[in-house]
Amino acid sequence: MLLPVAAALTVVLAQANPAAAGNDDFEVWTNYDRYGFAGIVRFVDYGPGAPGGGNNDDYLEIYDNHPDGHGVQVWAWLHGKYLDTKYHGAGSTNNPVYFDPYAIFPKNVAAGERIGVKICLVDGINNLIEDSCGSFEWQSIDG
């Protein structure tokens, strides 16, 4: 009788992960052109984005989708406090640049905190093309 209960408990524990209570994933895009969105940044609540491989909690994936001579730059905030910025200029490699500005906090992003992200096309680092920008704020569900 104890064996089926132990097996059921093991299955439940094996499926639990930091994002089980809710999912804070979202995307922000640059403007749309004839090829689609030139740049995308994804906030990932939990996934395979740890430096060197493995899973990570609360990080950003930055995509530069077009070989158009422009890169993309992302800025990150938490509760209105600017954290950091990251540039990606490879153009159409489909390989994201991983960016974890939240790792400086013991719990990364906590439930109820406001996550802010902005992405713009740039001609080199910090030389943004203003009308290309997209931004979004999200209140974390589970942290």
Image (cartoon, rainbow, N blue to C red):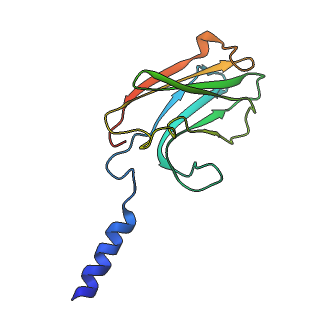
Report the residue at 60% width, 15% height from top. Answer: 132
Point out residue 97 in the picture as x, y percentages from the top left corner.
66, 38
- Toward which corner of the image does residue 3 lie, by quadrant? bottom left
Point out residue 142 in the picture as x, y percentages from the top left corner.
33, 43
Toward the bottom, the furthest residue is 1
Point out residue 75 in the picture as x, y percentages from the top left corner.
56, 24
- Toward which corner of the image does residue 33 lie, by quadrant? top right
Residue 83 position (above or below residue 43): above
Toward the top, the furthest residue is 130
Report the residue at 27% width, 84% height from top. Answer: 4
Report the residue at 66% width, 20% height from top. Answer: 121
Residue 139 position (above or below residue 4): above
Report the residue at 21% width, 89% height from top. Answer: 1
Location of the C terminus (image quadrant):
top left
Residue 60 position (above or below residue 74): below
Q: Is residue 22 left or right of residue 39?
A: left
For the image shown, how many numbered marks are present on the structure? 0
Residue in front for this viewpoint, 56 or 94: 56
Point out residue 48 in the picture as x, y percentages from the top left corner.
56, 52
